[in-house]
Image: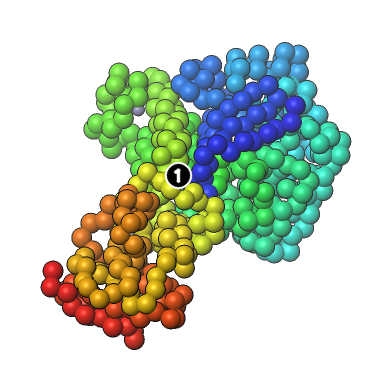
Amino acid sequence: MSVTFEVLEKDIAGRTGRLKAGDKTVRTPLLLPVINPHLQPVLPGEMKAMGAEGIITNAYIFSRSSEYREQALASGLHDLLGFDGLIMTDSGSFQLSVYGDVEITNLETLEFQKAIGSDIHVPLDIPTPPDADRMRATEELAVTMERLCEAKEVFGPDAPLAGPVQGGIFEDLREKAGREAGKLGFSFCPIGAVVPLMESYRYPDLVRVVMAAKKGLPSSACIHLFGAGHPAMFALAVAMGCDVFDSAAYALYAKDGRYLTPQGSYRLNELAELPCACRVCRDYSAQEIRESDDVIRLLSLHNLAVSLAEISGIRQAITEGTLWELVDDRCRSHPQLLRGFRELLKYGERLAGEDRISKRRFFYRGDESCQRTEVVTYQDRLSRLPVSGRVLIAMDGSMREGYDTLLLFKPPFGPYHPAMSETFPIGQSEIPDWDKGMVTRGCRGILRLIAENPGCHFTVYSRPEWHDLICQELPGTEVYCGNS
Ligand code: GUN
Ligand code: ZN
């Protein structure tokens, strides 16, 4: 009955995993398309065929619907929706945050979600908006936590319950909320009330909120980012350790005449071509979609296809250890996403502790790459590099006589022993012509090594063009100009 989560592979703080709820097993990262029974442009059964292993719908809508309430109670959601994958239901919390009031209690919505056969139930949490002050955020979080306790007490430790994490924009509250949800035994935790941050492109705030919640949450919990539906931000969120997304965006954007791509969205009106390989985009021209009576459905099908494909690409990137490259790609499509990416890079030390040690490759993409976890980890491990006596760091690549230890240099990592030239990251990193940022970062590695080995004497040979920068970065070190 209970919800279990098993991590299979890791990359940055992201992971591929297996989520089990009831008798359903799904792969993560996972996208749950949002189903609205009243206006559904794509049928749940069609979504399954497109690769959606789960869906999410709002129990509150069913409970208030004269059309569907009885049917949902009588035959269950899977039957009613024609979907045999995982079905998660949300409570009335979203309505609560939008309309201010719902006529349902925490226990009523949970009873109803259970009665209609939902695979994951959500208590009636209070989504505290980002503009709420600390007092309001604290009070609302206390109510949310009481409801999570109540849910566990009434339905038992093995009920398939989600434990939403609230706390507004206050990082300490988010962390505390995450820790308490973990202590209460929730193994599936949505991070809530982030929709307003995403709608206003406040990605740096989103990163801070998610990283704070993750700090408190157990690493074994499956993390759902509530309301995150734009494929351009999935990679960034996965890198922080989010496992599940729900997308209403595919339908909302379609209704608004917008065409999603993993690099951002276009208005259908401004597209002369359809840069996508999905069925719709191969069967129709942009002009034909615009003129079709079914424009919302066609756009929804496309939007969903690219969202699901992005999730597949992310799973593949994690498997091969290239998630940073994907995050870097995606976050360059919007300046605010780039700000979010840069905010995430500030957590380099913490992320390095979660990241795996060996990957398929490291492609240098500019200054941001200097702060990647692989660089942090490499430099943290430099204290283990065996050096003694007179140490030569041949930054120009030429070995010389008269030294006890011979080292080479690869920016942005730093010094390495020739025997490491085939090992990760030295052997698997693709570095273009040196630039100032990577050389500066690599010099930090040299400084670490010098600091760790006070008994050694270090001599650096640099190429002439880098001599001045290296002297500046390594004050007090003997730096000569090589000839190469
Ligand atoms: N959907 C989007 N955000 C939220 C949230 O914070 N809580 C719940 N229950 N549903 C949401
Ligand atoms: Zn398409």
Residue extending furthest bottom? 476
Image colouring: rainbow
Residue furthest left as drawn? 483
Does residue 317 appear left or right of residue 471 in this picture? right
Could you say where residue 59 lies in the image, as x and y percent from the top left?
70, 29
Q: Residue at x 55, y 47 (%)?
A: 241
Name the spot of residue 220 as percent of width and height, x first.
65, 43
Q: What residue type is labelled 1?
A: Ala
Quarter of the N terminus within the rendering: top right
Left or right: 99, with 301 as reference point:
right
Is 182 above or below relative to 113?
A: below
Q: Based on the displayed image, in which of its 4 quarters is residue 460 positioned?
A: bottom left
- Say whether residue 482 is visible: yes
User: Considering depth in this image, is 458 or 379 the residue closer to the camera?
Assistant: 458
Question: Helix, strand or loop at disc 1?
Answer: helix
The residue shown at (86%, 39%) is 153
Q: Where is residue 238 in the image (x, y as percent from the top left)?
A: 50, 45
From where the camera sits, is residue 95 visible? no
Residue 79: x, y in percent? Answer: 66, 14
Q: Quadrant of the C terminus?
A: bottom left
Would you place residue 444 above or below residue 146 in this image? below
Q: Measuring 54% from the left and 59% from the top, which residue is drawn there?
A: 350
State the residue position of label 1.
235
- Which residue lies at the image location 46% right of the left edge and 65% below the top edge? 384
Residue 271 to residue 182: above or below: above
* Other-residue count near label 1 (Cα within 10 Å), few / some / many at <14 / 14–19 / ≥20: many
Front in this rendered view, residue 384 or 83: 384
